[in-house]
Image (cartoon, rainbow, N blue to C red):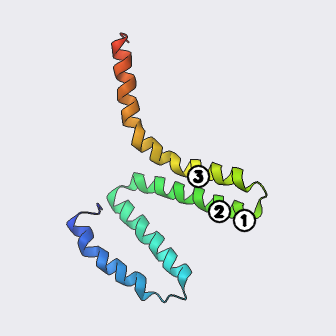
Amino acid sequence: MIYNSFNFILIYPLLFLLYYAIPQQHGRWRNIYLLLVSYALYVHWSPAHALFLMGVTAVTYAGARILRTTSRRKAVFITSLLLALAPLAFFKYFHFLNETIAALLTTIGL
């Protein structure tokens, strides 16, 4: 569901109110609700993109868990950060790189 669509504008206030209906002392349940709603919106919009979101969530969660127990905190942080940002970089720059390489190969006759 696209965030500027009419459907999202209708459903967002309900999701917002349900989030605040969960008592504040149950912060973990609020976070789980927020995660599930985010996944539901992504699945509704594009199931393939929801898989990427799940992968980023898994990498981020695993990185945070490992950071709690390791002495190599900087290496784990940088690795998990790069893995979490890799899909963003791919989607942002793939089309540009693909067109540039195709134009270059066409120029040299390949």
Residue at left offset 30%, top offset 79%:
13
Q: Residue furthest left?
A: 6
2 and 1 marks in contact (CB < 8 Å): yes
Determine the image quadrant of residue 96.
Answer: top left
Residue at left offset 36%, top offset 22%:
102
Seen in the picture, residue 106 relative to 50 is either above or below; the reply is: above
The amino acid at mark 3 is Leu
User: Which circle marks residue 64 in the picture?
Assistant: 2
Q: Residue furthest right?
A: 71
Alpha carbon distance from label 3 to label 2 = 10 Å
Dot 1: few (<14), some (14–19), or many (≥20) neighbours within 10 Å?
few
**Can you identify the residue that label 3 sits on?**
81
Q: Residue 80 at what x, y percent from top left?
A: 62, 52
Please tell me which of labels 3 and 2 falls first in the chain.
2
Alpha carbon distance from label 3 to label 1 = 15 Å
Q: Residue 65 at what x, y percent from top left?
A: 68, 64
Dot 2: few (<14), some (14–19), or many (≥20) neighbours within 10 Å?
some
Is 104 in front, or is 53?
A: 104
Q: How many marks?
A: 3
The amino acid at mark 2 is Ala
Seen in the picture, residue 87 relative to 8 is either above or below; the reply is: above
Alpha carbon distance from label 2 to label 1 = 7 Å
Describe the element under mark 1 as helix, strand or loop: helix
Please tell me which of labels 3 and 1 falls first in the chain.
1
Query: In this image, 55 relative to 12: left or right?
Result: right
User: Which circle marks residue 68 in the picture?
Assistant: 1
Q: Residue 9 at what x, y percent from top left?
A: 24, 71
Is 76 in front, or is 59?
A: 76
Describe the element under mark 3 as helix, strand or loop: helix
The amino acid at mark 1 is Arg
Seen in the picture, residue 15 relative to 97 is either above or below; the reply is: below
Residue at left offset 64%, top offset 59%:
62
